[in-house]
Image (cartoon, coloured by chain):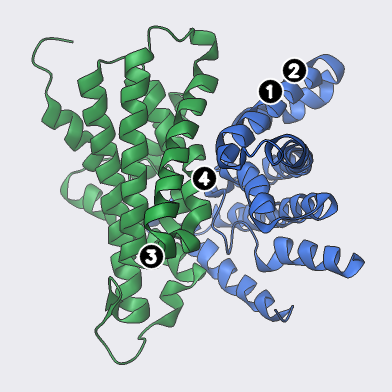
Amino acid sequence: MLEDIGIIFIASALINNFVFSRYLGLCIFFGVTKKMETAIGMSITFTSVMVISAALSWLVYHIIMIPLNLGFLKIVIFIGIVSGFVQAADTIMKKVTPGLYYKLGIYLALIVTNCIILAVPLINASEKYDFLQSLTLGLGSGAGFSLALVIMASIRERLELADVPKSFEGLPISFVLTGLIALAFLGFSGMIPL
Amino acid sequence: MNEKTNYWKIFKNGLFSENPVFRLALSLCPAVAVTGGVKNGFLMGVAVLFVQTMSNITVSIIRNFIHPRVRIPSYIFIIAAWVTVTDLMMAAYARDVYKEMGLYIQLIVAFAIILSRLESFASKKNVLPSGVDGLGMGVGFLIALVLIGFVRELMGKGALWGYQFTPTKPLLIMILPTGGFFVMGLLMGLFNWINRRFFGGKASTDVHMEAHRHGSH
């Protein structure tokens, strides 16, 4: 049981890292990694939203949708849950913890229609994970995404000083860099014999 | 808008000057994820083309009934409905491909490009121009995916659309995740270079930034 949880965590954080081997969340990945500070803010917000939305959608999926045979509506319902939750978090944070809101609130707005957040419940549903496994997948994916953001942000801060060909400035060179990091992450694929 | 709307111009806009992948740099995830081969790229492009056109038309028809304050959630649900249709159709008629990229088909719902076209075009225009805009954007997306898939499959497997040309696999790395990022970066650089060298235009990053500033993300 515990071993199972460990495997899911490592697999979702390193081996099937969302950015480097599942290629999800690239818009955010390239958008917020110009500065370390924003990358860290984004990581915290993303990980918490991921875990909570994984839990919420697991509950709705198993308590309401499966008994009523509504499995085919999962895309519509999951995106409703995620955007509803993010909107609620936005409003509650503004009232309860204004300090935290001014630090992390801008990232919340960016999250609503992001593929990673939606991917977690969808993967949970298709792999038929139980509640604890679903939470672990959310946490692991969040950790993996945070790791990717921090690595990329630290490289891009150095890249500011480098002399890049004019046509490759900005996004193109970032893509090539991501390719190199993905190559390194390929090394993790041997960690767990499947 | 005057009587004679230039449909060709609207259509062409999505192909070149605002190509979703290379110029606006939106919806990058699928552009890297499903382009290991031409066939997958093509089918993904068709799926996006369908969803974009249909949601553009739907939003354009009911745009006067949606209250501005709830417009974004309404758009998301319209997109989600059309994605569900596509998802079920793919699952029924293209089983083998669906197994490989089912997750990415379902995630079309979160593509920035679709929502941004609904917000910036379909919510203001009539049905016909909206449909044409959707077609143009979809075809632009399709071409980009097929182009990346072409380079990756040819170099990685020595094959095209599943047909083997060469006895060996020349550059296996091209069909791994790494290769996707490399090809994408190099093609983007190439487009920038062509654009600056022959048309004296702006780099795609500038266009990208402008698109974000207009609140299209």
Q: Chain of mark 2?
A: A
Q: Which residue is mark 2?
A: A91
| Amino acid type of the residue that numbered disc 2 sits on in the rendered structure | Thr
Depth-wise, is mark 4 or mark 3 nearer the camera?
Answer: 4
Judge from the rendering whether residue A93 lies leftward or rightward of residue B90; answer left or right: right
Quadrant in the rendering for residue A76: top right
Query: Looking at the picture, which amino acid does disc 1 mark?
Result: Gln
The green-tinted chain is B
Residue A169 in the image: above or below residue B49: below
- The amino acid type, in three-letter code, at marker 4 is Leu
Q: What residue sits right under mark 3 in the picture?
A: B183
Q: CA distance from mark 1 to mark 4?
A: 20 Å
Q: Position of residue A160 (x, y in %)?
A: 55, 52
- At a point 38% along the width and 12% down the height, the residue shown is B63
Residue B168 coordinates in the image, percent (x, y): 34, 91
The chain letter corresponding to blue is: A
Residue beneath disc 4: B107
Instruction: Tell me whether circle 4 and circle 3 mark residues in contact (CB < 8 Å).
Output: no
Q: Nearer the viewer, mark 2 or mark 4?
A: 4
Please name which of the two marks, 1 or 4, marks the residue nearer to the observer: 4
Callout 1 touching callout 4 (CB < 8 Å) = no
Q: Nearer the viewer, mark 1 or mark 3?
A: 1
Question: What residue would you read off at disc 1?
Answer: A87
CA gap between label 4 and label 3 equals 23 Å
